[in-house]
Image (cartoon, grey):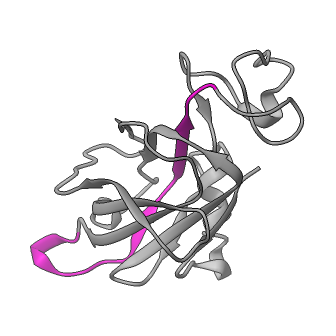
Amino acid sequence: GAAVVAQGENSGSGEVASNLVDDDPQTKWLDFATQTWVQVDAGTTYTLTGYSLTSANDAPERDPRNWTLSGSNDGSQWSTLDSRTGVDFPNRFQTRTYSIAPSTAYRYYRFDITNDAGTRGQWAPTQFAELELLAGSSGATCGDGTCNASEDSNSCSADCGPPRSEERRVG
């Protein structure tokens, strides 16, 4: 599966970056920083077609509000794929899914969160429960961590997870 790292995390309470890709919205990632980032190493290259974020269990003021999603093949030179501002998660465990125009295939994906939903203009820690990167149906063979259109999602669920129409989960 995908490896996830973040600028910071609340490891003492188990609120770590790897929780973002554990398919369990009851877990979350929390960083006490006011501006932060989360980076996914997909292990191979994918062309994203979309992504989703799921809000965590509590403290809506910690929800991400503004972010930029970028892709890279070396982990240091980044190309912007999508930017969002003023996003609201009015409910806990709410998933918001965003489509993006497919472009270049990248191995690394990074969310730079430049603001959270802190009240009265004050910064608050940042948290969310799940992060899904969605890629089109292309890739290699079952068992290698990638998906392709000919794979049976039941036999390749460890690679692909459940299909979402023609998309597969990357991280």
From the viewer's side, name the closer residue of 57 and 73. 73
From the viewer's side, name the closer residue of 105 and 126. 105
- In percent of the image, x 56 and y 35: which residue is there? 135
* Residue occupying the far front of the picture: 104
- In percent of the image, x 67 and y 24: which residue is there? 162
**Residue 111 location, quadrant:** bottom left
Q: Is residue 146 left or right of residue 30?
A: right
- In percent of the image, x 57 and y 78: which residue is there? 9
> Magenta stretch: residue 39 in it?
no
**Where 113 sits versus 22, above or below?**
below
**Residue 47 location, quadrant:** top right
Q: Position of residue 6 (x, y in %)?
A: 56, 74
Q: Position of residue 159 (x, y in %)?
A: 78, 36
Q: Position of residue 155 (x, y in %)?
A: 87, 20
- In percent of the image, x 33 and y 82: which residue is there? 34
**Where 73 sits versus 121, above or below?**
above
Q: Is residue 65 left or right of residue 167?
A: left
* Residue occupying the far left of the picture: 120
Q: How many marks?
A: 0
**Where 104 sits versus 95, above or below?**
below
> Magenta stretch: residue 136 in it?
yes
The segment highlighted magenta reads: 118-137
